Amino acid sequence: MPVVDLAKSSLRELNAALQQLGPTTNETDWTVLNPSGEHAIAAGVDAPVTVTIAGPVGYFCGGMNKLATLVVEGSAGQGVGENMMSGLIHVKGDASQSAGATGRGGLLIVEGNASARCGISMKGIDIVVKGGIGHLSAFMGQSGRLVVFGEAGEALGDSLYEARLYVRGPVAGLGADCIEKEMRDEHRQELFDLIKAAGEAGKVDVGEFRRYGSARKLYNFNIDNVDAY
Amino acid sequence: MSERDWLPTTPRKSATFDDYALSEIRRAAATGIYDIRGGGSKRRLPNFDDLLLLGASMTRYPLEGYREKCGTEVTLGTRFAKNPLKLAIPITIAGMSFGSLSAQAKEALGRGASLAGTSTTTGDGGMTPEERGQSRHLVYQYLPSRYGMNPDDLRRADAIEIVIGQGAKPGGGGMLLGQKISDRVAQMRNLPKGIDQRSACRHPDWTGADDLEIKIHELREITNWEKPIYLKVGASRPYYDTALAVKSGADVVVLDGMQGGTAATQEVFIEHVGIPLLSAIRPAVQALQDLGMHRKVQLIVSGGIRNGADVAKALALGADAVAIGTAALTALGDNDPQWEAEYERLGTTAGAYDDWHEGKDPAGITTQTPELAARLDPVKAGRRLANYLKVMTLEAQTLARACGKNHLHNLEPEDLVALTIEAAAMARVPLAGTEWIPGQRF
């Protein structure tokens, strides 16, 4: 069980060690001490390992993550899990803006609040935020699911493609081409599964959520929709 | 009084409301949509034709054309990257996406560039196996849309180009219209087939130079500090953009003038935003010199480069390399008169065809339609591109030798004069036959 203390080792040493791990490594449980808000901690990992980061992280923690489970025992700066491909990133505190931006896959869990542009341009990632999210979240979201236990800021889902959004709390406003949609059984089921994956099965009622998605009116340019652009 | 004994005034068309302006008004009124097209600015702009090189004379010795060496190699990314890109010639292929171009065209670009010892560049749509397989040196673009972005391709690349903007549309995003979204393009971009794919104008996870510095740090961490990191900007405020690129930690600055092409953008954007390449190079070089970074952070310039004279002049103004896009497509076969009958059916003519977004390219280059794309033989087209790149290099060498330079990078502003006052002011070289550089403070 390797322990890397960033007060003694450099970020480069840590990331190089993590990025060298292969699919069959025996070193599957890592701890990072004294992260002290450094940027790009555990970015680019591509192995089925667990990395527990004992404190707050800066920008782009877990960027482009594949397969790994990262646990941030603190808050995360901008772009946590940006473009992640797979695996799990679990932020125990709050997350700054652009959490999970352009994420392709995997699951990002934020125990606290996320900020503006949460899930911006998401492309397959699942995001569960147990607090609220800021404005312009899921902007141009292409696919994947965003689940929010709390409230959502202005312009939720602006210019949305096929990402599906589930929000329990009040929504300050919907962005262009984002509408509330009917919650059918298949949606209740996928929402239940996501809540379960986030460790809240039985504690959160899927019936309290509303579903938002694309009206698909901006999919092909039409001059009569110009006010929406 | 029925018979006039004087001739009527000659019908006179307005210089302001010329035939093109009138046709555009009628088109807008009929369709209710702005004109979208490919390519770069088509209007007459101050360009490299407005500069002349001063050959050797009594004060300079020329080099013998067939005996004395004139070096052409360039190394890009010497500032921070462990593995800088070493190219045989200072002419690279600019970023163009699979999606806007066919897979065959991308393959041909890779083949031609590799034969000539230079790099090609992906675009807004990710990296294709055809392109990676045929490109000895491949630059991977990192764009706001992040279509197709993944760490494996990032690591497979030889350099990374973060795109802030491009010369055809500084400040603008992109659009790939639904008719070009084939199954493969849709799959690579993770979007439904047949819908318009918009590309954002700002990156989703950073804003401003301070954030960008951290983003560059992240990309270096993910790629083990191996890859040169380029920063591409559309020419608008080149002095400050270059200075901020240096501050952000870039290895290479790519500066694209308004003649630089695009796959599809509004005509009004192409013709009215940004500045000509001729006017952008000296401010960018000045910024590098002011920071003590000229030749340490390399400068690639693009936008309307056509021949070896353009290359020589761009390098004389202080660039380390140039990039070509439109010219490379022309070498592959774009707008070739052999397809004239088909161009006419599309309402245009060879040399003017620019509806690249519609995917109907008779030359099979800017299309995703299999029957059209199959018209382009990637091997033959790649050979044409290689020939063209070699001719450009020979031309630039010829001019450099005439100026007494044993490497293209030894060309300097002192080798140049301008034919027009505008070009003299923009390129900061004297008007031919004078010592006058307009705008220079004494």
Image: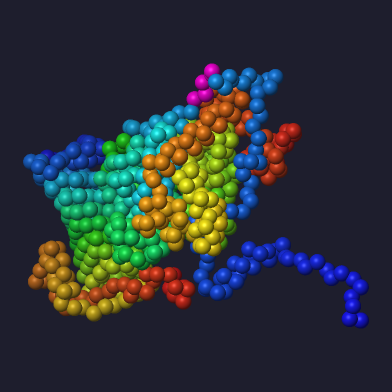
Image height of B402 relative to A59, above or below: above
Task: Tell which of B355 and B210 is nearer to you.
Answer: B355
Residue A131 showing in the rendered view: no
Task: Tell which of B116 and B322 is nearer to you.
Answer: B116
Residue drawn at (45%, 40%), measured in percent from left and top?
Answer: B385
Image height of A145 relative to A23, above or below: below
Decide if residue B198 is on the left or right side of residue A149: right
Which picture quadrant has residue B134?
A: top left
Residue drawn at (48%, 41%), measured in percent from left and top?
Answer: B323
Image height of B171 relative to B214, above or below: below
Which picture quadrant has residue A181?
A: bottom left
Q: In the rendered structure, does residue B11 fall within the stretch colored magenta? A: no
Which picture quadrant has residue A220?
A: bottom left
**Residue B373 appears at what percent x and percent y?**
38, 53
Q: What span is in magenta?
A: B67-71
- Residue at the bottom extreme of this rendering: B1
Decide if residue A37 is on the left or right side of residue B100: left
- Quarter of the figure that contains the C terminus of chain B: top right
Residue drawn at (18%, 73%), measured in percent from left and top?
Answer: A187
Q: In the rendered structure, does residue B70 fall within the stretch colored magenta? A: yes
**Residue B242 appears at what percent x and percent y?**
49, 43
Decide if residue B293 is on the left or right side of residue B435: left
**Residue A84 appears at what percent x and percent y?**
24, 53
Image height of B160 relative to B65, above or below: below
Residue B388 showing in the rendered view: yes
Residue drawn at (16%, 74%), measured in percent from left and top?
Answer: A186
Main SS of the magenta segment? Answer: loop
Decide if residue B222 is on the left or right side of residue B353: left
**Residue A101 appears at what percent x and percent y?**
30, 57
Task: Tell which of B343 and B232 is nearer to you.
Answer: B343
